[in-house]
Amino acid sequence: MEHKWELIDSYDSDIENIDSSAQELSPLKLAHQTIIMLDYPQGYKVYLLSSEENITQEKENIDIFYHLLYPIYTQYALKSKNLEMEKLIEGVQNITSSLDLDVLLTKILDNVASIIPGADTAAFWLYNPVIDRLVCKAYRGWKKEIEQVKYRVGESVTGKIFLDGKPRIYNSFREANEAMKGTSKKNDELLKKAFHGGNVNATISVPVSFHNEIIGVLGIHRVNLEHEITDWDLKLLKGLTAQIAIAIENARLFTEINRKNQVLIKQNEVHATLTQLSIQNKGIDAIVKELTRMLGMSLIFVDLLKNEYFPGRAFLSFSMEELTQIIGAKNYPIYVDLYDHDEKYFFIYPIITDSTCTGCLIVSAERSITQLEHMIIERGGSVLALELAKRQSLTEFYFKKTSDFYQNLLRKEAPRLLYKQGLDIGIDLNNYLCTTIIELTNFIDHHVLQTSIHRLVSRIKSKLTGMEKIVFGNSNKVMLLLTFKTINAFPRVLNNIKEILKEWEQNEGVALRAGVGGVYKGIESVYKTHNEAARAIAYLSSRHRSGLMEFSDIGINRLFLNQSKEEIERFLEEIFGPLNSNKLRNNDLEKTLITYVQTNQSAVKTAELLHVHINTLYQRLKKIEDLLSVSLEEPENRLKIQLACHLKESFF
């Protein structure tokens, strides 16, 4: 009997509900047809359909069918492989033709789907070293929640492949699910939300490497297909991932070059724009406004020399003292977290002039500053440094001009003209006058000293707002001439000056000396109050002390301010030298004499303080009189010894 047979490729067959586990020797009955299924390598199946329902086939006949059809299978398999290779080559060409990384990754997954049947669900994971996570850079067949999944290195299948570089193939859902144990709870929840809900029959994940360094992982899920993933599929993917890695590196290099190009173009644009504003003398406000526009972020410029900030209407989250402490001697940018009612983040960029921080830019940022933004800030800082240098030059000119005027006041030349010039600068020299001289010590670097002088002058001006004054820097000193209508205003002014010195020492860590002259009325008194302030400074210097000293507080010591140190030392040697000749008890004799003078020559009090018997004290006093050849009862000798004890305590 003649049988009519039809050859059907299982990939293209519309046959449904056929048990793929059925034996070849047992023909299937289906819709008035007989079906014989033949298995061939690499998952190929051939179904023989007969229009007759009752057919019995012996194993030998089926074997004949199998071998007769083998050439057809071989031809078809070869054609299929050639088609896959053509798609692979075409896909690689598509990949290498694009340098846009996002477009590239989309093409990668499209290419995978065209090469491997059923690979409609895929994801490409790229390692991000900044957060030390594998992130999903492209996906196909997943929902948007997959973008939120971030694998740790070694986590789940993807993390393990990135760690050891070994591909994984799982030919069942249960097997794949078992391998995903160890996935974090958050990632697991996100994966469940992102999955489309199809029936996964097989999965394959392979590392993507460049120059022996793993840069990512490609994962594929086969859905609703019976075919297992074969070694051929793995080879195809390995060949594809090698090209993927090269293409990604090319795209990365292109992106990097393009980014650097953009940075360079932007750098030139920023430099040209800001330099033009500086050349046109538009001022700091205009430069800061343009910088803010370029950045698109909140920005404040702080002039630490004049204690000013721009724009003036902005809210400055730090005091000048806090900024000084935060920046300190740093010459590099820093990030600062500020906890007030809520958490705020700031990027502070110090502006250095002559190795000294003279200002800073403060950017309110909720994230790290990008390279482009950093470049804009850096260029802006350079231009603002020039503006600060201009300001310093103008300030130095003001100091010189004011110093010349002050020197003329000291020389008392043309007082009427000087009085008129004083009115022009806002000071009435016919009022009460007082000079204060503030000295900065222990500075080695000239630029640092000058910067400190400028800042101290600015601090004094801001603290003594509304008062008539002349204030300027001169070498390592700040000269301050104050005028007030009534002498009763002096104590309040003096307290303000003390507060300025205290704050400066606390914030800057630098000790100051300040000498304050007496309060006198009229322009003719400028020299007198200045001379007293200078002598008060000299007194502090001779005693190696810091702080503030009024000339009136020097007391009797003002009589010796003009005496040389050598002359005072000779006088003291005349008194204490003979006492030091007795090597056995010299310290006792000197101490006894000083204590005796300090107790107003009270023998009882002296003996108590020295913890000696009264008779021992008398013996010591007699010894002192013998060594000095004086009588302690004579007024002239007592005065001489009292003066020696005072000078020793005051100057040494």
Image: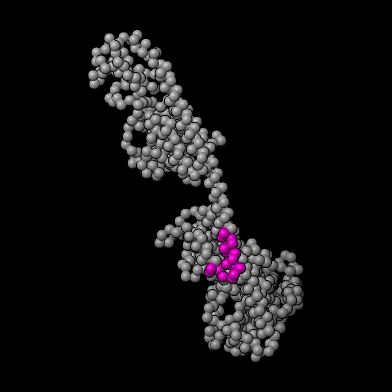
Q: Is residue 280 magenta?
A: yes
Of residues 583 and 489, the one nearer the viewer is 489
Of residues 105 and 628, the one nearer the viewer is 105
176 w.r.t. 425: above or below:
above
At 55% from the left and 44% from the top, the residue drawn is 253
At 54% from the left and 75% from the top, the residue drawn is 462
At 65% from the left and 75% from the top, the residue drawn is 397
Question: Residue 360's quadrant in the figure?
Answer: bottom right
Question: Residue 81's quadrant in the figure?
Answer: top left
Of residues 348 and 341, the one nearer the viewer is 348
The x and y percentages for residue 220 are: 41, 33
The x and y percentages for residue 568 are: 73, 76
Which image quarter holds the N terminus?
A: top left
Q: Is residue 236 left or right of residue 66?
A: right
Which image quarter holds the C terminus?
A: bottom right
Q: Looking at the magenta stretch, what is its main secondary structure?
A: helix
Q: Is residue 277 magenta?
A: yes
The x and y percentages for residue 224 are: 33, 30
Q: Which residues are magenta?
A: 269-286
Q: Would residue 519 be seen by someone viewing this image from the given angle?
A: no
